[in-house]
Amino acid sequence: MRVLVFGAGSLGSLLGGLLARAHDVTLVGRDPHVERVRADGLRITGEHSERVTPAATTAVPDERFDLAVVAVKAFDTAAAADALGAADVETVLSVQNGLGNETRLANALAADVLAGTCTYGARLTDPGVVECTGRGEVALGPPGGGESAAADRVGGAFRAGGVETTVAADMPRRCWEKLAVNAGINAVTALARVGNGALVDGPAGETARHAAEEVARTAREAGVDLADDAAVEAIERVAAATSANRSSMLQDVGGGTRTEIDAINGAVVDRADGPVPVNETLAALVRGWERERGLR
């Protein structure tokens, strides 16, 4: 299968590198990472250890691809859709954070669009080097739920690359559960400047759990069956499993770059019929930090 990975940062590079063991993969990212991959290949360290040689470029080639994996920040989804328009892509899989990415991609592209979640941990340690900080799973399927031939094909391609993969008929629930995890972990760790492990039994964990409960209530208002205790259990499970990790939003704040707050806690506020004071407060605080630094 010809695979294009748009957004060859940490997660995109890891997934693209794993897929390159079985497929013809092209990474689209930024220099100096792309330049190093083009010259020396991509080295994967950590839970996986190997070197692969995908193609690498800073612009989408005007070529045909069976699959495009979109791994950019949620606020770059529109730009991703524009860029992917230069290629002939049969199927698009989003593994992004937040809600609404698949809709934006589907509205802009003449391709089958799939929703995906990913629990692999990844970190770019140097140009051309990505560390797998934790083995996980990719779940994928139609954004509205159910089954599709496109999902089956993509699932088979991921498995062929040795990626633990579930082709799921319940992607709406999985995406909302992922949102609950991100809403509870990302903003709380970013504001408190703590690692994920601090949410397991520390005082910040209560705020994270309340944020997840609000996400679950909002999901049920949208017709998605996600119980409060299931959302809280997901937060606790992920925080414990990634206790040594720094969340992506904490890394953004530490690096002084824009966060995905609008697509995570902001998305809960936008979609809720009732009050969601924890998510509203977290979103307001992170947006306030961004505004002070000229990021919005």
Image: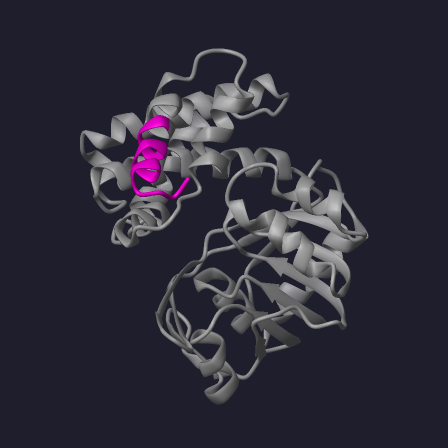
**Residue 194 at x, y percent in the picture:** 21, 44
Q: Is the magenta stretch mostly helix, strand or loop?
A: helix
Q: Which residue is drawn at 74% across and 64% down?
A: 86
**Residue 17 at x, y percent in the picture:** 52, 73
**Residue 180 at x, y percent in the picture:** 45, 33
Please tell me in which quadrant of the rendered image residue 181 appears.
top left
* Towards the viewer: 146 or 7: 7
The residue range painted magenta reads 284-296
Q: Which residue is drawn at 42% across and 76% down?
A: 32
Q: Is residue 229 magenta?
A: no
In the image, is residue 20 above or below residue 263? below
In the image, is residue 38 above or below residue 17? below
From where the camera sits, is residue 236 visible? no
Residue farthest top in this picture: 274
Residue farthest left in this picture: 202
Count of numbered circles in the view:
0
- Quarter the C terminus occupies: top left
Q: Does the magenta stretch include residue 291?
A: yes
- Side (left or right) of 27 relative to 198: right
Q: Residue at x 32, y 32 (%)?
A: 288
* Towards the viewer: 156 or 267: 267
